[in-house]
Amino acid sequence: MSKHQNICGLPNKHEELLHSLTEHPLQIICLTEHRLHDEELEGMTFSKYTLGAKFCRKTHKGGGVCTLIKDNLHFANINIDKYSKEMDIEICAIKIQGVSRL
């Protein structure tokens, strides 16, 4: 099961997110509006989850997207940074390994 969440600032909601994932574990969660720079996001820990893919703004404040992947899933990051444009389209992508297409 996966979910999308507009987090409206991950630093202020990090603990709440971890608590929610403990009570309602998801395989994949996509977060928008995390409002962090690369090094800040990479420095955060998410118990039982791995930071899968991310896009962080470099010029403007706010924004950003990322995926958190349950530790037991195998995935590959798909680099689509060239398609992202701050404040217009901010995207990231992963490919789950070992999952057949329907």
Image: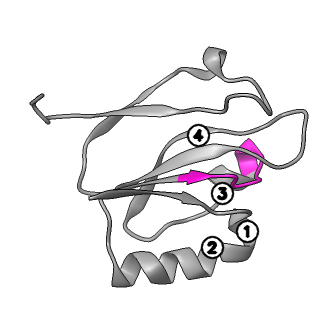
Q: Position of residue 50 (x, y in %)?
A: 43, 54
Q: CA distance from mark 1 to mark 4?
A: 16 Å
Of the numbered discs 1 and 3, the one sitting upstream in the chain is: 1
Type of the residue with mark 1: Pro
Q: Amino acid at mark 4?
A: Lys
Q: Is residue 71 above or below residue 20?
A: above
**Disc 4 designates what residue?**
54
Magenta range: 31-39
How dense is the environment of label 2, judged by Cα within 10 Å: few (below 14), some, or many (20 and up)?
Answer: some
Give the residue number, with chain letter if any, for mark 2: 14
Residue at left offset 90%, top offset 38%: 60
Q: Which mark is residue 11?
A: 1
What residue is rendered at 51% in x and 22% in y? Answer: 79
Q: Which mark is residue 43?
A: 3
Q: CA distance from mark 4 to mark 2?
A: 16 Å
**Residue at 90% from the left image edge and 33% from the top image edge:** 59
Separation of residues labelled 4 and 3 (CA atoms): 13 Å
Q: Quadrant of the N terminus?
A: bottom left
